[in-house]
Amino acid sequence: MSSMLHPDNDQTINPSGNESIRDVMEQFTGRRNFMKGSLATATLATLGGFSLESLAGGYPGYAGSPAPTGSIGFTGVPANVVPMTDGITVPAGYTARVLIAWGDAIGKTGPEANTHWDPATEMTAARQLTTWGAHNDGMHLFPFPGNGAGNLANDRGLLVSNHEYVDPAQFVNITTPYTGITMTKAIVDAQVAGHGVSVVEVRKVNGEMKVQRPSAFARRITGATPCKLSGPAAGHALVKTAADPSGTTVLGTLNNCANGYTPWGTYLTCEENFNGYFGSTAAKLAAQPLTAHENRYGLAAAGFGYRWHEADARFDFRDNPNEPNRFGWVVEIDPWNPNSVPVKRTALGRFKHESAETVVGADNKVAVYMGDDERNDYVYKFVCAKKLDTKNRAANRDLLDAGTLYVAKFNADGTGTWLPLVWGQNGLTPENGFADQGEVLIKTRQAADRLGATMMDRPEWITHHPVTREIYLTLTNNNRRGTTPASSNKADGTTVAASARPPVDAANPRRDNRYGHIIRWTENGNDVAATGFQWDIFVECGDKLNANAHLQGNIIGDDLGAPDGLWFDKDGRLWIQTDQVGNATGDFANIGGNAMFCADPASRRITRFLTSPRNCEVTGITTTPDGKTMFINIQHPGEDWTGSFTANSTWPDSGFNGPTTQSGKAVVKPRSATVVITKDDGGVIGS
């Protein structure tokens, strides 16, 4: 895979000898026992949440919501296999159309409100600051007050979306190798502006959801937007720089992957592969080699090949060694206040955040569940010190600044334990490299290593059932190649030496977990603050037609691999999105390109709902409160591992879904875009 493209986190950089989830699973034979009948017999507990004043987007469990059934009422679509369709397919009776694509105006007030980028030209920072960012990922709709269920509007809202990364060559419109161009600050600034978050207002006009232009709420938050550091690591010596001697103000947020939202109406954007934006020179690294801390977080001389450090010293981690410590956080954004400053909540820990799922207990305790998207890294939970105030939104402003961060240990008997990452406890002491709680959080991975957390197969999105509070997590894959702890054991009991983990082969098919799986758990006593839980494997993904039994999985229904996006709708249907190479070849020849599926948690039946353009990722999902309008993101259509785009896709301007270039200019390149899905009879999506 090209170093400039979407990182697949296939380098194991966890040096601990901790037990992996595969080691645990191989010992666990009763893994489904505890869940039998759990959905059918669960007590219908209304979550403590807001009504009108929260503007949280129909937080699951709001008063008046019906008991979820999880039933699926559509006929699935076939897999998009070779020869692939370069478009979106949805079931009969549904319509999908493009809402907004990279470079389309977000509607900022002023002369730029309706000015779209011409894809035939180079993308500049100035144009990107008024237009939809690149490679949209996690997303949430915050509805306006209205007359719908929970007093929320179904025809007007703020759509907030992450923009995970950029493909540099597409920004500068070159056909020559990107590695050979002369880097300039202008090029860096344009790419930095392509990252971050977009906020647009959407309204239903003549029955069709559209972007409102202009809108006072329209906003871009980028890799250069001032953000506040808060919580225990704010002001720490390890986050101070020459440009910010106080260690409290960071320029920007980067690699914004999955997301979350809070019941008090704020958006949580998660910084994932931030390490790839930093680099340095061979001479500097020869004089001062990578530290253990830098290695643990994946810093390298060339990063992902962006080369920003060549034109902007902020991204040279030898010139500014603390700058990377200022990334890898969960960032809270208030979409309702366009002048608000994004806040990096350091109490939630620093790692490659994938998802931040907020769950409210029956007693209004609040927990945030998070995954570290790296092979052989961990799952975390943060429990707020204070309870949710359901009457006063402002009282929750700093709720995420104080509490306890835990890391998960999965036991072979189907139980689990949340291990507290608290300074002074369990070896998190100065003699072991942790001077205070701030350092524990900046070095969250090392702290979790020391506590003996369970290494996972790339934790990605997390979601929870809207009534039972069962937590679901996608573990997308783990080929376990690269540097591996010497203490890692094979299923036959033999030990694999460091850096000698064998590649994928028929003898070790599920250890090299190429198709991934979905795990779920319930907290003891259904208490979000509990320190113990029970876990289960919801599904092992795979290809039923694969000749190797270990790769066939146990899916009831349509096969899938590399599960990534995960989300529950208000009726208890589980939506699963996939992120694999997307060209329907190799391991995915039968499964097809990336797709979105719907699962019934009770029966475990999985049905394919949507197939996507070539070489893209399906990601991001949210709906209006009534569930009748769905938004999803299509990311990096046409991308492959050699850097070619248009040879694979011309979506969304290919005509499969009608003309979508709002600029009316000639088609030059495929673009990431947000898609709106509706049911032709006006019904609830999935019903």
Image (cartoon, helix red, strand yellow):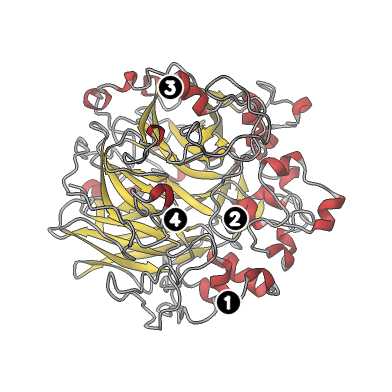
Q: Of label 2 and label 3, which has the lower sequence position? A: 2
Taking depth in this image into account, of 562 and 156 the one nearest to the observer is 562
- Residue 668 as seen in the image, left or right of residue 85: right
Residue type at mark 3? Answer: Phe
Residue 162 is situated, as x and y percent measured from the top left of the image, at 47, 57
Residue tagged 2: 227
Residue 167 is situated, as x and y percent measured from the top left of the image, at 55, 65
Residue type at mark 2? Answer: Cys
Instruction: Report the mark closest to the observer, 1 or 3.
Output: 1
Residue 137 is tagged as: 4
Residue 270 is situated, as x and y percent measured from the top left of the image, at 52, 48
Q: Of label 1 and label 3, which has the lower sequence position? A: 1
- Label 1 with label 2: CB-CB less than 8 Å: no
- Determine whether the residue tagged by mark 4 lies in a helix, strand or loop: strand
Taking depth in this image into account, of 479 and 472 the one nearest to the observer is 479
- Determine whether the residue tagged by mark 1 lies in a helix, strand or loop: loop
Residue 174 is tagged as: 1
How far, Cα to Cα, is label 2 from label 3?
35 Å
How far, Cα to Cα, is label 1 from label 2?
32 Å
Residue 533 is tagged as: 3
